[in-house]
Image: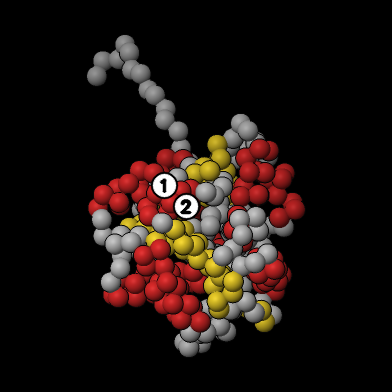
Amino acid sequence: MLGIAPFNFPLNLVAHKVAPAIAVGAPIILKPAPATPISALILGEILAETDLPAGSWSVLTVANERMPALVQDPRLPVISFTGSDTVGYQILDSVPRKHVTLELGGNAAAVVLADWSSEEDLEWAATRIATFANYQGGQSCISVQRVIADAAVYDRLVEKVVAKVGAQVTGDPSDDAVDVGPLVSEAAAKRVESWVDEAVAAGAQLHAGGKREGASYAPTVLSAVPGGVKLHTEEVFGPVLTLHRVEGADEAFAAVNDSKFGLQAGVFTHDVQAAFRAHRELEVGGVIIGDAPSYRADQMPYGGVKDSGVGREGVAYAMTDYTYERVLVLTGLAL
């Protein structure tokens, strides 16, 4: 099989592919992201010291433009890809007869319903939203990109979110005083900058951030983002969140579903009926109640719907993906 890992969690997401393959005895070629290959290579060195059979794993550093031949190689019948939806569906379209799992992007929503209204509730929601909009520099498929809040709590929540985001410090992530590190490259930061500038030019209101310094982009909050701009429809993959006022759960859940992505959503509510309704109606792979959408445990079936992917990651689910059932029928044998 072929495992293709992204840059943003260069050890964790490599392990999500390599460990299940080793567990079921499926030989794997692991292709790390060109920007972050070192942790995969170190893992390869560690595996080289074990008694695993020769050929059970390989780490192959190769430029992205040379990948089509590897993707299409018939000796690799299973492909597990984590990355952008554009590349993911190019892979899927190029190998229609292979078994392909895709964990792609998202523009995850955090919904705050009217019953989540106490000062303690809103402090918690604002803290979690500010933290998980900007962790990893916002370079996570399930970082908070959209905040959808009921009008009953919107103004109070916005004040708290803007204050908490504005207080976050950018800089060298090895410094304990820094909350938000740089993006993977200056080009990535310039792209985020251009998307924010486009939204502001189209009428969005900037509440915090909006400034770039090299590869760093200040944690940013916007509201009144028009529907047609990239920041509304695409995955920003940077430290940027947008605020949306809605009236009631019907409008909130419709806003979540008004996206080509469907990876995870967070719903802040104390109402168990609303919680089960969210799970039933939201077109996403996972719903997190009482917290941001950015929760993931290695044992859970993690993945999305729509343009967020095909299949599920998670140890047991990946082990199933990397294997197939084989039937043995015994006849005419004295047992």
Work out whether residue 325 can be spotted: yes
Dot 2 corresponds to which residue? 256
What is the x, y in percent for residue 38?
59, 68
Q: Secondary structure at mark 1?
A: loop
Q: Earlier in the sequence, mark 2 or mark 1?
A: 2
Q: In the visual, does 41 lie left or right of 273?
A: right
Q: List x then y, in percent, for residue 100.
A: 56, 40
* Quadrant of the frame with the C terminus: top left
Q: Is residue 45 in sight in this rendering?
A: no
Q: Which quarter of the image is occupied by the N terminus?
A: top right
x 49%, y 72%: residue: 135
Eyeballing the image, is 90 above or below 121?
above
The residue drawn where x is 39% and y is 49% is 250
Taking depth in this image into account, of 172 and 33 the one nearest to the observer is 172
Q: Nearer the viewer, residue 172 or 239?
A: 239
Q: Amino acid at mark 2?
A: Val
Q: Amino acid at mark 1?
A: Leu
**Local crowd at mark 1 within 10 Å, few (<14), some, or many (≥20)?**
some
Instruction: Find disc 1 in the rendering and name its residue.
Output: 282
